[in-house]
Image (cartoon, rainbow, N blue to C red):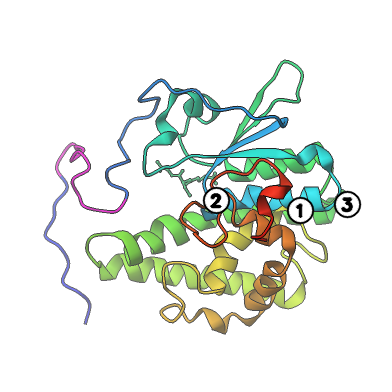
Amino acid sequence: MAQELSDYTPPKVWEWDGGADGNKFASINRPTAGAREEKDLPVGKHPLQLYSLGTPNGVKVTIMLEELLAAGHTGAEYDAWLINIMDGDQFGSGFVAANPNSKIPALMDHSVKGGPQRVFESGAILFYLAEKFDAFLPKDNAARAATMSWLMWQMGSAPYLGGGFGHFYAYAPVKIEYAINRFAMEVKREMDVLDKQLAEHEFIAGDELTIADFAIYPWYGGLARGLLYDAKEFLQVESYEHVGRWAKQLSERKAFQRGQVVNRPWDEEKGLKERHDASDFDGKV
Ligand SMILES: N[C@@H](CCC(=O)N[C@@H](CS)C(=O)NCC(=O)O)C(=O)O
């Protein structure tokens, strides 16, 4: 029998409770945008400056940068600076100038004329890098359309996994059956979409590795590998066998392994707080 529904009736006008609702991220979010303090961003020696954190959205970009470097694109050398979102670094004036939406990842490209050029939203960063280096985005019309379709699919779908399922299953201060049911169903449907696609293709968009794989792997590959929200059993993730095959295959690539440890200070064994040089991975990956 379904959980009893709450007797909450929304007031005429919504008011912020000041972050008192007890969820894990309550203290950082407010209903307003913009900088909360003056704070410049550090700038390192490489043209590409990444301001990020090793979450699924952050590692999409570091995986791509490491794949670009592995493929010989020396211009993809980068400095990755830590933005600790639990400490509110995303609300410093320098970061807000890089991304007015105050969310990691944000990229500044100092190599462009009249620059630096800011790029925010992980999907836009992947696309920007693909165009800049002419890599991981097929030229053939059909393959390019497939890649961009799957890239946009990820940008539209992952909020149901993270903000929806992950939030209500793992972080909300109360377990709400209605919300967990709604998002568990949607996430399982999304996994099935991927499973059907990967039953017929080696990579997400076809037979080559593209920016769609970089975008989708950290979220859905992570889920398939049992790394997200302790939900392996609850969502029966092992039943998506083709997603599991693809995730395993990508997890064995050195560039994926490197990309996934950048800006992860909480990973005591392999994590890098910052990344400035390939030698930073020595003894780790
Ligand atoms: N659609 C955005 C989502 C980015 C995002 O949600 N970033 C989270 C971390 S994974 C964040 O910075 N949160 C900080 C906050 O909400 O204040 C993207 O793909 O870049």
The residue indicated by pointer 2 is: 57
Q: Secondary structure at mark 1?
A: helix
Q: Tag 1: residue type?
A: Glu
Stretch of the chain drawn in magenta: 11-24
Q: CA distance from mark 2 to mark 3?
A: 27 Å
Q: Secondary structure at mark 3?
A: loop
- Label 2 beta carbon less than 8 Å to ligand 1: yes
Residue nearer the viewer, 203 or 81: 81
The residue indicated by pointer 1 is: 67
Question: Which numbered dot is residue 59?
Answer: none
Q: Count residues near mark 3 (Cα–Cα under 10 Å), then give few for <14, some for 14-19, many for 20+.
A: few
Question: Which numbered dot is residue 140?
Answer: 3
Do tag 2 and tag 3 residues touch (Cβ < 8 Å)? no
Residue nearer the viewer, 39 or 182: 39
The residue at 57%/51% (across/down) is 272
Any magenta on residue 240?
A: no
Frontmost of labels 1 and 2 is: 1
The residue at 18%/41% (across/down) is 17
Q: Tag 3: residue type?
A: Asp
Q: Count residues near mark 2 (Cα–Cα under 10 Å), then give few for <14, some for 14-19, many for 20+.
A: many
Dot 2 or dot 3: first in sequence order is 2
Left or right of 55 on screen, residue 79: right
Left or right of 225 on screen, residue 276: right
Do tag 1 and tag 3 residues touch (Cβ < 8 Å)? no
